Structure formats: structure tokens, C-alpha cells
Image (cartoon, rainbow, N blue to C red):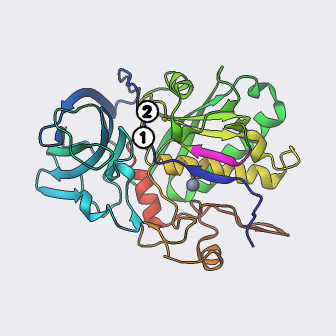
Amino acid sequence: MTGMLSPMRCLSILLLLTGCEDLLGKEPNFSGYSEEVCTSAGIATVNVDISSTETAFLISADGDHLVAVESIRSPSGTVLHWEDWYTSTNYLTSAIWPLSSEMVLNWPIRAEEADLKQGTWDIDLAAVDSSGHYKNGSCISVTVQTKEDDNFGNGTVNVHLVYAEGVDALEDVTIAVDAAIERWTDIWAPMGLTPVVRQSSGSIDPDLPYAGNGSEDIYDVTLDSYEDEITLIMGETIEGSNDYYGVAGSIPGTLTATTRSAVVMGWVANAGLDGNFSELDISIMGETMAHEIGHYMGLFHPVEQTFDAWDACEDTPECTSSSRCDEVLGSNLMYPYPVCDMTGCVEQGDLSDIQGEILHRYTGAL
Ligand SMILES: [Zn+2]
């Protein structure tokens, strides 16, 4: 049986990007720039010049209309076309869905996507209205970030953990957060990934916004993060409730400051119904950190809770019922909910090889 009363881990794929900061990457192997492109025949092309040492790029777009990736063309040909994935029940990236004026694309995604060939890559972005009609003369602000790290077996991910106002005064919470970060570190260790967490105190209201809906308050917090840091905000509740352990702004998320560029978590849900952090609560909080940051780095659930849509990882099974999926995927880090019974919960720390490939290819994994 599953924990029906358990809060969910969730995110929204509706995105909105309202601003970009100057890029000041503190890592020498990480850089970026911003520009504006406008559509003709509904398409605006972003030219990304890739050097021999660059290995991944992240594009964040903010348009006048809904924005989605039409195609990605490498120097030797098309490597992705929206129609190949649009109606698929396997999700590779939310960038192909025109759901919002904001779009975030990381490339490559899996190891099977082409290596990042040197030369000019053309990323065609479509601007469409809510009926799906292409829009001409529609302008899109674009930020392109790249990394030069060619080690896809070992890496660090810089995370800026910001406590909402007053939360870092609660010693039980800060002790639990530190222990949860250790659990997260242990989960990632077999894949050669290490979270490097910088903690600070913020003034955001501890009742946090739902990150997927976007919020100026999230934007303000992320202005204080470095350009190679993912922002994780630790508050008390999310949208006034304990329905969620945590929420990621988008899949993937951007490294620029936007209204959705954060993972938000509420400590009360993570402490469980009694308000005290047990060892199990701390373990689940560490799993939630790794799960939500996993979404932010491009991972979908291996199976959605509707049991009719899956990720694009061939090494995660395509089960079709809760009982079967709990059995074959219940220990996966990206499973959509904790699997618990009267005796406890299944540890959810497993990642498949392809899930690991995706994390390592995220432009913020250095
Ligand atoms: Zn999730």
C-alpha cells in the first residue's frame, strides 16, 4: 500500500521567465550571454557557437507568446524535432511543449544524444498563440549558458540553500536539514555527483510560493545566487499547505534568476504529522532534496502517477499500475511518491544509469 496521506513531490511544467541577470559565472569552465531574437514565419533561430572544449548548453527563453523548441540542428544535421516527442508518452524535455512564454532547454540530455560537436548549432524556437498558430515578429529574450566540463562520470552541483525568514532560528530544523544533506550526498555518491551546498538566511515569507507558478519573491531570492548555483529555498509551508514536501520550478530549470528558478521545500511536511524530525523523516527529506534537484536537472518521474506516461530512459521499466510500479520502481529516487506501509517506507535512493547520464549532462553539473 502507498502512503495516501503523504505529501506529494511535484512540479508544474507551466513556466514563466521574467528577467535575466548579467552572467558572472564563478567557475572558469562556465559562461553565458543574453540576446534577443525575433520570429519570422513563426520561428526565431538562436545560433550557439560551440568551441572544441564546450560540452553542454542551457538555453532559457522568455517570449511575448508561448515558446517551444521547434528543432535543434547540430553542425551536421537535425538532432531533435518537436514532432518526434510531442505526442510521445515518453518525456524527454518540457522544452517542446508550448505551455508558457518561458522555456528552458538543456542539451545534450542523455548520452545517446549526439556529442556536442564544435561549430554553430541552430536552435529554432517557435512562438505560438494558445491555439497553436505560429506568430510572426514575436521577440524572445534568450540566455545561453555553456560548460566546458567533459567529465560525465564525476562532478559537483553548486546549490544555494536559502532559509526563509525565521526558519534558520529553529535549531531542530537546521540540524535536520544538515542531516538530510548528508542523506542526499549519500544518494548521489554512487553516480560520482556531489552537492556543494552554500547556506544563507533570506527574508522571503516562510509560506513559500508554488515554484512552478512563478513568483517575484522567488526571483528576488535567486538574485543572490551565483550563476552556477541552483537555488533551494527552505520554508515552512508551500501555498499555505503541507500537501507538498517540495516543488521544482521546471524540468529542467535554469541557472539564471527568474520567477521559477528554484526548488522550494516546506519543513513542516518533511517533519511528518507529529512535527518532529524522526530518522525516517530526515531520510525522506534528503530524498526530497535529491528528487526535486533531480527534476531541476532534467529528470522526469520514471512513471507518472497516471501510470500512462514515462521518462525517456530505456533502463527504467514501463509499468502500468500502482501495485506493479511500486514493486519495480518504488525504490527509484524519481518515483512520484513515497512507498510506505505500516512498518515503514521504502528507501528511494536508486538511480538508473541513464538517469545518471542526464544529471551529469546538466549544464550546472560541473
Ligand atoms: Zn517529482
Q: Main secondary structure of the magenta part?
A: strand
- Is 362 on the left-hand or right-hand side of 47? right
Q: Which residues are magenta?
A: 242-247
- Is 91 on the left-hand or right-hand side of 272? left
Disc 2 marks a residue whose amino acid type is Asp
- Is 238 on the left-hand or right-hand side of 47? right
Position above or below: 333 against 224:
below
Residue 265 image offset from top left, x and y in percent? 66, 40
For image coordinates 73% across by 53% down, the residue present is 283
Q: Quadrant of residue 267?
A: top right
Disc 1 marks a residue whose amino acid type is Gly
In the picture of the structure, the residue carrying the numbered disc 1 is 364
Q: Nearer the viewer, residue 240 or 204?
A: 240
In the picture of the structure, the residue carrying the numbered disc 2 is 228
Residue 246 on the magenta span = yes
Residue 141 on the magenta span = no
Q: Nearer the viewer, residue 131 or 277?
A: 131
Q: Earlier in the sequence, mark 2 or mark 1?
A: 2
For image coordinates 45% across by 49% down, the residue present is 251
Residue at the limit of the structure toward the bottom, as seen here: 324
Instruction: Identify the secondary structure beneath mark 1.
Output: loop
Residue 181 image offset from top left, x and y in percent? 66, 44
